[in-house]
Amino acid sequence: HVFVSADGENLIASYNKFVVTVEPAIDTDPEPSGIFAFSHRIPLAGVAHIRHLLTSWPPGTDSGILTNLKTQLQLAIDHAQLAIDAATLEEVQLHTHHVLNIIEGADGANFDASFDNPGDGLGVLLHAEDRKHATFAAGEANEIIFTTNAALVEANGGNAEERAIAARDQALVSLGQSNLFAAKLNLISVVGLLTTALHGVDANADGTVASGGNEGGADQAYIAAQLMATYTMAEGGLEAVGPEL
C-alpha cells in the first residue's frame, strides 16, 4: 500500500511512525479512536540519517546528499554538452573547467578558482562519498530493510562516484587538446560517463537498470534511500520510547 499526503507534505522529512486505527464505518469524530490495528516506528536515530540522504543536508536545507548529487551531476552534464556545442576552443575549455569544478568542488585537486563554479561548491565527489549516511542509518536499526537498502545506496553511489571520477579524468584530457575537434571528441565520453553516473546503465541489455551491481547510479541510490524508510506493519500499537510515543 502507498500513502501520499493530500497536502504534498514530505513524509520522510516529517515523520518516523505510521499507525492504523480501527474506526467506525460512519465516523463523525476527526480524532483517532485509540484502538490500534497496526503500527511501525523507524528509530529516530536511523531516520535522521535517511533525512540527511534525502531532505536535510547540509542541515537547515530542504534537500539531501543524494538529491544534491543528482542535481550536480545534471549540471555537469549540461556544461559538458555546452562545451561540445561551443564554436571556439576557448569556449570549450571554459565549460570544461566548469565541469571539473562541479565534479571536484572547491577542495578538489583540479578545482580552478579562476573559473566560475556553477555548482554548489561541495562537488559531485563529496556528495557521492557522503552516501555513507546510509550505513550510519543501518547501524541504528536492526531491520533487514535497512541493511539491504543501505547496501544498495552504497553500491549505486559507489558506481556514480567511479563514473564521475572517470568523467573528470576524461575532461582533463580534453583540456590538454589544442585542436577544437579533438577537445570536443574527448568530451563525448564525459557526457556518457556523467549520464550513467546519474541514471545508471543497462549493462546486460535486459531493458532495465538494476539497483546495485554494476548498473545502478545516483537515481537508484536515491530510490534505495527512500526504501529504507519503508514501514513494515505489525499488529497492535506502539510502545512508548523515552519521552516519545
Image: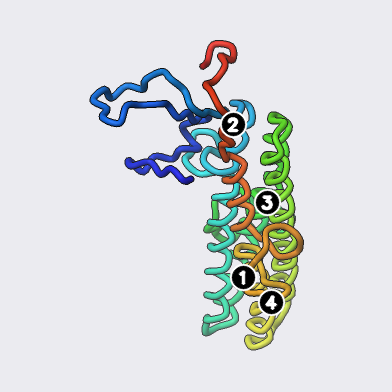
**Is residue 238 positioned above or below 216 on the image?**
above
Lower sequence index among marks 1 and 2: 2
Residue flagged by tag 2: what amino acid is it?
Answer: Ala
Q: CA distance from mark 2 to mark 3?
A: 18 Å
Residue flagged by tag 1: what amino acid is it?
Answer: Thr
Q: Residue furthest front?
A: 25
Question: Which residue bears the numbered disc 3?
Answer: 128
Q: CA distance from mark 1 to mark 2?
A: 37 Å
Question: How many neighbours does mark 4 have within 10 angstroms: few (below 14), some (14-19), or many (20 or more)?
Answer: few
Residue flagged by tag 3: what amino acid is it?
Answer: Ala
Give the structural element (helix, strand or loop) at label 3.
Answer: helix
Q: Quadrant of residue 218?
A: bottom right
Q: Which of 178/121 is in front? A: 121
Q: Quadrant of residue 220?
A: bottom right
Question: Which residue bears the numbered disc 1?
Answer: 96
Question: Which residue bears the numbered disc 4?
Answer: 205
